[in-house]
Amino acid sequence: MKPRYRRMLRGMKVKEEQTEYSASGGAAWFLYILRCGDGSLYTGVTTDLERRLKMHQEGKASRYTRTHLPVELVYSEECGLRSQALVRECAVKSLPRERKEGLIAIEADIDLVTASGRIERELPPDEPTRTQRLDASIEKLREAKLLLQGVTQKP
């Protein structure tokens, strides 16, 4: 991260601490990744994912996505405060494409397993061991996601 951005983020953090701003008291900030029509990835932050995605899809959000339509949301995570979201955005933007794709793939696997778990639980449970295996798979994927996020975030 460039020194200019580090300085800016430190200043934001101090300001947030001085005003006693808490993540629960204000709107939560989210990091998101969009896959553009040409296959490129766009990373940004917002407090309202649905509104921001709609703006991107209408070509009203950023110059980049305006020229790379259509876009789809492939990854999002809650970051808490604005400064935390911006730090995370810088970290994700500095990742090589393969690492970003890995982050997206882990999120997609968690969604897929969770969705199949919901379907299974709506039916009468014939095999409780299958549900337990599914829960274990979900937990392993979440741990892998946290590990990947921990590796990409710098203290």
Image (cartoon, rainbow, N blue to C red):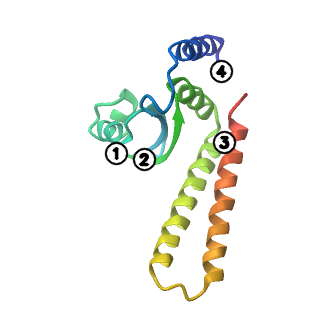
150 vs 134: above or below: above
Which residue has dot 1 on it? 70
Q: Residue at x 36, y 27 (%)?
A: 63
Q: Which mark is residue 73?
A: 2
Residue highlighted by disc 4: 1
Q: Pick the quarter of the image with the C terminus.
A: top right
- Mark 2 vs 3, N-terminal side: 2
Along the viewing direction, whichever of 22 and 72 lies nearer the viewer:
22
| The one of 68 and 55 positioned closer to us in this rendering | 55
Residue underneath mark 3 = 149
Q: Residues within 10 Å of mark 1 (few under 14, many from 20)?
A: some
* Badge 3 density bin: few <14, some 14–19, many ≥20, Cα 10 Å: some
Mark pair 3, 4: CA separation: 17 Å
Label 3 residue SS: helix
Sequence-first tag of 3 and 4: 4
The type of residue carrying mark 4 is: Met
Q: Quadrant of residue 70?
A: top left
Q: Secondary structure at mark 2?
A: strand
Mark 2, mark 3: which one is toward the viewer?
Answer: 3
Secondary structure of the residue carrying tag 4 is loop
- Is 3 placed above or below 63 here? above
Residue in the picture at 45% in, 29% down: 25
**Which comes before the other along the chain, label 1 or label 3?**
1
Mark 4 and mark 2 residues within 8 Å of each other at the beta carbon: no
Disc 4 or 1, which lies upstream in sequence? 4
Give the residue type that dot 2 points to.
Leu
Q: Position of residue 146 (x, y in %)?
A: 67, 47
User: CA separation, marks 4 and 2?
Assistant: 25 Å
Q: Secondary structure at mark 1?
A: loop
**If you read the primary sequence from the N terminus, does the residue marked by circle 4 or circle 2 appear first?**
4
